[in-house]
Amino acid sequence: MTAQLIDGNALARQIRAEVAHRTEALKARGIQPQLTIVLVGDDPASQVYTRHKVNDSTETGLGATLERYPATLAEAQLLDRIRALNADPKVHGILVQLPLPGHMDASKVIETISPAKDVDGFHVASAGALVTGQPGFWPCTPYGCMKMLESIGYELRGRHAVVIGRSNIVGKPMALMLLQKNATVTICHSATADLGAMTRQADVVVAAVGKRNVLTAGMVKPGAVVLDVGMNRDEAGKLCGDVDFEGVRQVAGWITPVPGGVGPMTRAMLLVNTLEAAERAAG
Ligand code: GUN
């Protein structure tokens, strides 16, 4: 058997079209959804990511501003700027690009963002809303994974989902979203004794570790859905995920490629959250 591909590019395109449509409706009411991205320092990867986020936004009709500050910016100044953005009714979403320079406390910075504008879904209030099933913003990567499962009409109720990785921005929220859809969820991590024994029981595996070949063909139940959140490079410098794609695709029922899988969905879900923030503010 060869797994069917879940095409993140195609699904993201569809989601962006929906966002564009809903954005038009807001604009007709005189509201311009607006995302402000704050970039501190000149980390090369962050510069690329933030440029993509701005371009994605403007191509979809959302307003997006990139504010750049030197790495020497004092934390207090950044917090003041965030408070000003919180108070600005024209700004619906605030994203502070990570990593921040070493002298800043990232948690403190994120907790300063108003939860109503936390389109990354990184604030403790957003995490708490997800835990308790209340409205809030979901982190974009696991949210995108849920949309991918939805796109193939996958019924999670009663299924066993195994999440590999326990980060605050992917693994933990992913597990909670799967739980909310009535899956039985196992979270595996670096101290898990026998990862393969866990994943072989899984109907859905989400690999979110940041290491190549964490999941190989012998670790996958035939027909399982495999979502690959990883973004790594192989020896030849080629982009690859956490999953041994060529091996696992022979066993799985569905699989996401890297590139062209979860990545474009993460980007698309930021647009959804920004639009949602504007719609909520508009009432
Ligand atoms: N750095 C890498 N990915 C992200 C992200 O999704 N959001 C923020 N704020 N910073 C990042």
Image (cartoon, rainbow, N blue to C red):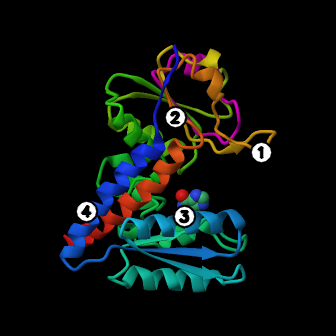
Quadrant of the drawing holding the C terminus: bottom left
Residue 213 belongs to magenta span: yes
Name the residue that disc number 4 marks.
22
Residue type indicated by callout 3: His
The span picked out in magenta is 196-216
Is label 4 in a helix, a strand or a loop? helix
Dot 2 or dot 3: first in sequence order is 3
Does mark 4's beta carbon lie closer than 8 Å to ligand 1?
no
Name the residue that disc number 1 marks.
237
Name the residue that disc number 2 marks.
256
Bin the neighbour count of mark 2 within 10 Å (Cα to Cα): few under 14, some 14-19, many 20 and up. Answer: many
Query: Which label number is shown at residue 52?
Result: 3
Q: Nearer the viewer, residue 204 or 124?
A: 204
Verify CB contact (< 8 Å) between mark 4 and mark 1: no
Residue 267 visible (yes or no): yes
Residue 38 belongs to magenta span: no
Is label 2 in a helix, a strand or a loop? loop
